[in-house]
Image (cartoon, grey):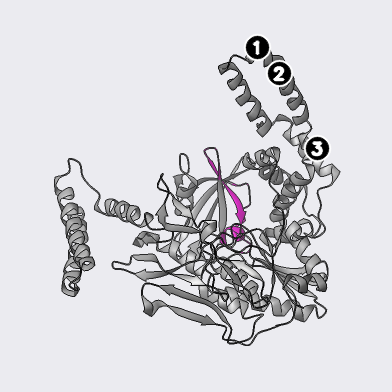
Amino acid sequence: MIRKKTVLIALMIVGGLCRLEAQNTQPSDRSFELSKNLEIFSKLYQTLYYNYVDDVDPGATLKRAIDAMLSSLDPYTVYYPESEMEDVKLQLLGQYGGVGALIHQQGDKIYISEPYKDLPADKAGLKAGDRILAVNGVSTEGKSNADVSNAMRGQAGTDVTLKVERDGKTIERVITRAEIKLPNVPYSGMVMGDIGYVKLDDFTQDAAKHVREAFVKLKKENPNMKGFILDLRGNGGGLMNEAVDLVNVFLPKGKLIVETKGKVSSKNLKSYTRLAPEDTDIPVAVLIDAYSASASEITAGSLQDLDRAVIIGSRSYGKGLVQNVLPLIYNTQMKITVSKYFIPSGRCIQAIDYSHHDAEGRPVKVPDSLKTAFKTANGRIVYDGFGIEPDIEVEQQYMTPITATLVSKFHIFNYANEFVKKHATIASPSQFQITDEIYDDFVRYLSDKDYSYNTESEHLIATLRDAAKEENYYDALKEHLDALDAQLKSDKSDDLRKSRAQISEMLKSEILVRYYYAAGRLEGSLATDPDVIKAVEVLHDSALYNKTLGRK
């Protein structure tokens, strides 16, 4: 009976849409096509439900149909059923109901990776490395990371019982879920003594307010502050108005920051700075990378277009599309792309054209031939169509194969858990280092662990072997290929030494978070961060700073 009621409701919704459209249809081909196709879908859906050989779950079937339809448009237009409202809240507000801990999966086991400071899991004494055995009495065996995460989430004020294993002992905790508000500014502080630094993780509600407060606090506590770094790396964006209010910290009231243009003219708008600035003179550097998107690109792009900050790092993602979250019925919602945004120079930085696809059905990037040159306030040339290109590009460092293997196989994570058991305290984040003693201990820890990996050279030799066999050259080349293999194996045995600096940074990061949480991890990384080092160099060199911004 419940299933029939559900499908009838769904059909009434679709049918109602058809009737509503019919009442408002204008004498145009587009309106007729919309009405006709809604009626076809309604009839198909009803026929499917009553005639298909097996039972059809109407809700799941409709969700798959909607997802497939929306995915053909762009990846940002998404339907949210009532069951996913927590995800909407997390995206827009940066908050959800839960215990406040990151988890991950190692094989078929689920572990706590990081409890957030002073949130329910942390207050209950849960630690990184605790293996989650059960949630509310339901075993996690055979469950995925997403399954366990969803089970731990729930309405704030409700209880969840977690059973965990630590050092062979079973611990059970009843934890009251809270409204978890993720801090959009996880760390702020001074770098190299006289440069302020703020890390912004996302543009959720009040992001601009928190950056402004952090900036004001740094200036007050450090009256000789010579410059300021805003770190937007890894920041996928969020609310556009927060980006406008953020740049307002450094730009006067009344500046046009972003304009949106779409099919519905009533949704087009121009957004100007609306508040008094905090500082329009202090040198500013903004850090971006390939994961800086949307509101991050509005912030970085507008400061670049108005020549108010030097942009440092690597090219940003290239998302110039604006979404609105619109309510539907039965507590469902849809996030829908409604327009494109244009920053002060007039450019749109959208990198992918979702209206055109290649032979394999993939959306295409905007070709170089269609990219247009624009000018900043000082006359510098900037381009549309491929994200924000930094004023100063810093070569990106990638993990060596051995470092990537140690991370992906959780050897660094697991060693940090063992380290904590032997060290009650460590030095402050800015002072703590991986000493020879610690690194040697880590190498000993690895002695009975599997961290085998293949280098690119080994892959190439294997490919060459296959090609030589196919072309009948193998017998002649075998001795040389074997020698190369032996040489590579010999060289690989020294990889722990050659990659020590990189592995040490990963070890330091994982250990620091055990004692000082996410803020400690960030603080400890700044002194060796190439982007931060370059930003400090530029901010200390007024001639280079002004030249980069096209100032005479």
Name the amino acid type tagged 3: Arg
> Disc 2 or 1, which lies upstream in sequence?
1
Q: Is residue 415 magenta?
A: no
Q: Which mark is residue 497?
A: 3
> Disc 2 or 3, which lies upstream in sequence?
2
Q: Quadrant of the N terminus?
A: bottom left
- Label 2 or label 1, whichever lies nearer to me, is 1
Q: Determine whether the residue tagged by mark 1 lies in a helix, strand or loop.
A: helix
Tell which of 11 and 72 is nearer to you: 72
Q: Is residue 415 left or right of residue 348?
A: right
Residue that numbered label 1 is attached to: 475
Position in image of residue 306 (x %, y %): 64, 77
Q: Is residue 423 above or below residue 499?
A: below
Tell which of 356 and 124 is nearer to you: 356
Q: Which residues are magenta?
A: 105-130
Position in image of residue 185 (x %, y %): 63, 68
Q: CA distance from mark 2 to mark 1?
A: 11 Å
Binning the other alpha carbons within 10 Å of mark 2 as few (below 14), some (14 to 19) or many (20 upward) gives: few
Residue that numbered label 2 is attached to: 482
> Disc 1 or 3, which lies upstream in sequence?
1
Q: Is residue 106 magenta?
A: yes
Name the amino acid type tagged 1: Asp
Position in image of residue 508 (x %, y %): 75, 51
Binning the other alpha carbons within 10 Å of mark 3 as few (below 14), some (14 to 19) or many (20 upward) gives: few
Q: Is residue 21 above or below residue 276?
A: above
The residue sitting at the front extreme is 369
| Cβ atoms at labels 2 and 3 below 8 Å apart | no
The image quadrant of residue 477 is top right
Q: CA distance from mark 1 to mark 3?
A: 36 Å
